[in-house]
Image (spheres, helix red, strand yellow):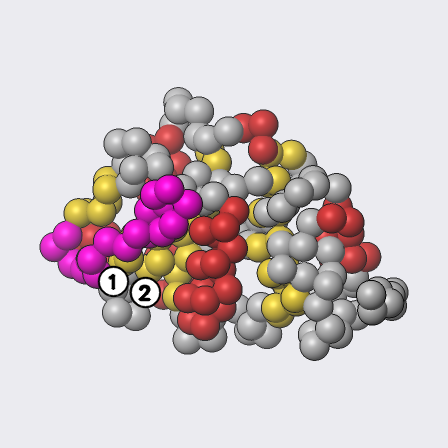
Amino acid sequence: MEKERTKPYVKEPDLSYGGYTYADCLSWDLEEMVELIKGNVFKKAATAPNRIHQRLTGDLHKELNMFLKGKTCQAYIAPFDVRLPVQSKKDDKIYTVVQPDICVVCDLDKLDDRGCIGAPDLVVEVLSPGNKQLELQHKYEVYEESGVKEYWLMDAAGQTLLIYTLIQGKYHSSRLMTSGDRARSSAVTGFELGLEAFFAEIK
């Protein structure tokens, strides 16, 4: 058997290395936000997301909060760490930590002072020019594998929405929805979003 590689301790992550854990993340002193996907580090864009991205994210978070008032589920907006453990919940055994634009958690036992540990019920990612490959490939895979029941992928520029619903461990996609459609969540029972009125407010 090949000798196991020993990971060097570093304050600044080597983006080409991989094998990092949540415990490593906690030791880094970085100005920019990073996400950890299967041990690989992905730095967020150096500049803040554009205005339309932020407006759409904030408005959708507000809609969810209004709907969830008095209910058990809670909605959170980035930056908010979502740790997705595979076998162990120990910091040095968690290799995926993401910061969805919005997430809804209905099992409140998954929440602690550092965020969420385990799959949220609903995750929303809002596309922007710098993040499309990350959202479309890497995050799709970890959300599916981790058991996120529903994944909304919004395109702020194109004003479209795809909903991926987890059925028997695999995501099944809705058709591409746009203005005039009404989005309905199966993970957050009863939540609906009229896309025409919603996108009309994003200016």
Cα separation between marks 1 and 2: 5 Å
Q: Where is residue 12 in the image (x, y as percent from the top left)?
A: 79, 70
Q: Can residue 166 be seen in this view?
A: yes
Q: Nearer the viewer, residue 164 or 72?
A: 164
Q: Which residue is drawn at 41% across and 45% down?
A: 169
Q: In which quarter of the image is residue 104?
A: top left
Work out which quarter of the rendered image holds the N terminus and state it: bottom right
Q: What element carries label 1?
A: strand
Q: Nearer the viewer, residue 87 or 155?
A: 87
Q: Which residue is drawn at 43% across and 39% down?
A: 121
Residue under pointer 2: 155
Badge 1 vs badge 2, beta-carbon distance below 8 Å: yes
Q: Where is residue 66 in the image (x, y as percent from the top left)?
A: 35, 34
User: Horizontally, is 133 left or right of 198 in the view?
Assistant: right
Q: Which residue is drawn at 15% across and 52% down?
A: 181
Label 2 Cα crowd, 10 Å radius (few <14 / some 14-19 / many 20+): some
Q: Position of residue 50 (x, y in %)?
A: 43, 70
Q: Where is residue 173 in the image (x, y as percent from the top left)?
A: 28, 55
Residue under pointer 1: 160
Relative to 66, residue 77 above or below: below
Q: How many numbered circles does the render carry?
A: 2
User: Horizontally, is 143 left or right of 65 in the view?
Assistant: right
In the rendered image, residue 26 lying in the magenta stretch gets the answer: no
- Range of the magenta residues? 164-181
Label 1 Cα crowd, 10 Å radius (few <14 / some 14-19 / many 20+): some
